[in-house]
């Protein structure tokens, strides 16, 4: 696993997308049942207004409150990717 930081660079979001596409295109095996997923959540510095409880609810696989304009309601099951549990 590699770590790349793009937030302090000019046009960091574009650079992040380009590196992600490069990594994905160089992957030899593309398995629809086990796809390559690249994800990084940085809500500590960039998105200070985001409720952090949502992250814990995903790990618990159950909503503790309503999200997404009440499309997800308190008590609803929330799927959690196994890779988030590592």
Image: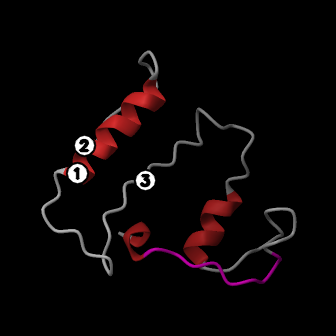
Whether the residues at callouts 1 and 3 have beta carbons within 8 Å, the answer is no
The residue lying at 47 percent from left, 31 percent from top is 13
**Left or right: where does residue 23 sit relative to residue 48?**
left
- Residue 22's mark? 2
Whether the residues at callouts 1 and 2 have beta carbons within 8 Å, the answer is yes
- Residue 25's mark? 1
Residue 85, how many percent across, how many down? 41, 72
Q: CA distance from mark 3 to mark 2?
A: 15 Å
Residue 72 in sight from this viewpoint: yes
Using a 10 Å C-alpha cutoff, classify the residue at mark 1 as few (fewer than 14 neighbours), some (14 to 19) or many (20 or more). Answer: few
Task: Kindly state the secondary structure of the residue where label 1 is placed.
Answer: helix
Judging from the image, the colouring scheme is secondary structure
Per the rendered image, the range of residues in magenta is 73-81
**Left or right: where does residue 81 sit relative to residue 20?**
right
Question: Which of pointers 1 and 3 lies earlier in the amino acid sequence?
Answer: 1
Q: The C terminus lies in which quarter of the figure? A: bottom left
Report the residue marked by disc 3.
39
**Left or right: where does residue 42 sit relative to residue 82?**
right
Query: Where on the picture, by quarter, is residue 34?
Result: bottom left
Q: Residue furthest right?
A: 70
Q: Residue furthest top?
A: 10
């Amino acid at each position: 696993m590699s770590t790349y930081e793009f937030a302090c660079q000019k046009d960091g979001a574009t650079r992040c997308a380009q590196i992600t596409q490069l990594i994905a295109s160089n992957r030899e095996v593309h398995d629809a049942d086990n796809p390559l997923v690249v994800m990084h959540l940085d809500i500590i510095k960039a998105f200070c207004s985001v409720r952090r409880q949502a992250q814990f609810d995903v790990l618990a696989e159950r909503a503790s409150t309503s999200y997404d304009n009440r499309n997800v309601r308190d008590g609803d099951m929330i799927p959690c990717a196994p890779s988030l549990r590592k």
